[in-house]
Image (cartoon, helix red, strand yellow):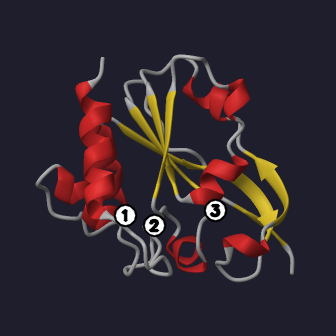
Amino acid sequence: MTRVLGFAPECPADSRVLVLGSFPSVKSRAEGFYYGNPRNRFWRTVCGFFGEDVPTDIEGKKQFLRRRHIALWDSVTACVIRASEDASIREAERADVAGLIRGTSVGTVLCNGKAARRYLDEAALPKDIRVECLPSTSPANPRFSEAAWHAALAKAFSEG
């Protein structure tokens, strides 16, 4: 196994919510953007919350994120990983989430699954940042809950 790099963050200054994944899947890395596996429920869930269709290309997804004030990144920026298995992550380089959101409007970090939360350095975050761990949108997660995601998004966008 070789060391693999993740994606640069998508984080405009007016972002209100940061969705933090663990590390891009093999299919996402092949596509070159977040949640590129068509079976991953992220885009359907978040776009559905806003009553929008899922954009068909990366630029459309970036425009959606900007329009809806959502930032994306992963809690691991580089690692050794087998396929798309979070449990196999080794030599993880943790993301500087506190540095990323400094100077933005982010008030909520939504972790897309337990691995994203595990690698997040919460102690470095400002005390007023709310962190919530949601069921992973991965197709491998049988306990996914669209209702939990919609409730978390509603709360995040109703605050401040």
In front here: 64 or 97? 97
Q: Give the labeled residue for mark 2.
A: 35
Q: Give the labeled residue for mark 3.
A: 23
C-beta proximity under 8 Å, tags 2 and 3: no
Q: Quadrant of residue 69?
A: top left
Circle on res. 42: 1
Mark 2: amino acid: Tyr
Residue 86 position, x and y percent, is: 68, 70
Mark 1: amino acid: Phe
Identified at 33% across, 43% down, the residue is: 152
In the drawing, does residue 79 fall left or right of residue 50? right
C-beta proximity under 8 Å, tags 1 and 2: yes
In front here: 152 or 73? 152
Cα separation, mark 2 vs mark 3, equals 10 Å
Residue 143 position, x and y percent, is: 42, 72
Mark sitting earlier along the chain (3/1): 3
Cα separation, mark 1 vs mark 2, equals 7 Å
